[in-house]
Image: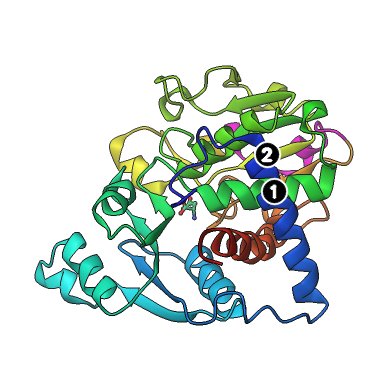
Amino acid sequence: MHHLLTLEHMPRAMLEHLLVRAQDLAADAEGGVARRHVLAGKAVCTLFFEPSTRTRSSFSLAAQRLGADLLNFDASTASTTKGEADLDTLKTLEAMGVHAFVVRHKRDGAVAELAAAANPGTVLLNAGDGRSNHPTQGLLDMLTLRQAKGEDFAKLRIVIVGDVKHSRVARSDLHALRALGCGEIRVCGPAALLPEDGTLDGCVVSHDFDAAIEGVDAAMMLRLQRERMAEGLVASLEDYHRDFGLDAARLRRAAPEAIVMHPGPMNRGIEITDEVADGPQSRVLRQVANGVAVRMAVLEALLG
Ligand code: ASP
């Protein structure tokens, strides 16, 4: 693996290796074990052409915990606003000696294009491109599931709920869940927000959340991308909440120890109620914590 662009077709053994390594690194961090020698002398740049809270901060922390020099490039205040091409920006930073770029872009495939044009030794990590891929989110979600439910994904029943059509998180989760042999993957949402392009092959697709959540071990909620309201894909927030929002009553239909996940940012009161988001079954902050560990494991594997 030279770059991390997608989890699609990543071999199961590689996925599992990264998850095990992330778990070890998380334990080291908790135990105060320093890992600052791993990337000493390497320069990592976060290059974000789209907003981010969790992904950017956790990549930054991960790089610093491994001892890398860190450059945070904010495309909203830089020469990109003067029309500089994305590739020129990358080449400029490459010339300064940056070894790895963590890139988020609103266009599908943009990170892969930059990877193809970068110098041979440069490493690209996809931090989310369009609706296509968000591989480190997929990994941190798998780590969260593994911690809660164990290594054997074959016995798991999972439901992914909401705006799958526009979600790079859902796509990366699906790639990883399939590779790890998840027993049953259910996908639930309004018909207008479910893709019809083969993304859901092998999944049990439903528009009835009460039925789809029955007996599951984990509910993976997605952000309702409110920008879709303008496109008329969702009738109203009230309707969406009634049909696809996760509240405590619905959660009782899941398996007793079921966990609830959400990649953030959450629309509280729309796809998830406060009671569930902050309740005992929520793993939302665990996902955030795992994000740092997973990003350390990935940076170490690609640059260490
Ligand atoms: N933060 C995630 C992403 O960048 C999920 C979301 O925005 O809904 O894809």
Residue at image point 16% right, 71% down: 81
Q: Amino acid at mark 1?
A: His
Quarter where residue 23 is shown: bottom right
* Quarter of the figure with the C terminus: bottom right
Q: Secondary structure at mark 1?
A: helix
Left or right of 60 in this view: 26:
right
The range drawn in magenta is: 243-255
Q: Secondary structure at mark 2?
A: helix
In front here: 161 or 66? Answer: 66
Residue at image point 62% right, 81% down: 37
Label 1 with label 2: CB-CB less than 8 Å: yes
In front here: 78 or 234? Answer: 78
Distance in Å between CA atoms under marks 1 and 2: 6 Å
Q: Residue 156 — which label?
A: none
**Among all residues in the image, which is located at the extreme front?**
120
Q: Name above or below for residue 233 compared with residue 51.
A: above
Quick check: can you spot residue 76? Answer: no
Q: Residue 17 — which label?
A: 1
Quarter where residue 165 is shown: top left
Indicate whether residue 218 is drawn in magenta: no
Residue 189's spot in the image, x, y percent?
Answer: 54, 29
Residue 216's spot in the image, x, y percent?
Answer: 78, 30
Q: Name above or below for residue 111 compared with residue 14.
A: below
Left or right of 155 in this view: 177:
left
Local packing at callout 2 (Cα closer than 10 Å; few below 14, some 14-19, many 20+) is: few
Q: Amino acid at mark 2?
A: Ala
Residue at image point 49% right, 34% down: 164
Quick check: can you spot residue 137? Answer: yes
Indicate whether residue 249 is drawn in magenta: yes
Q: Residue 13 — which label?
A: 2
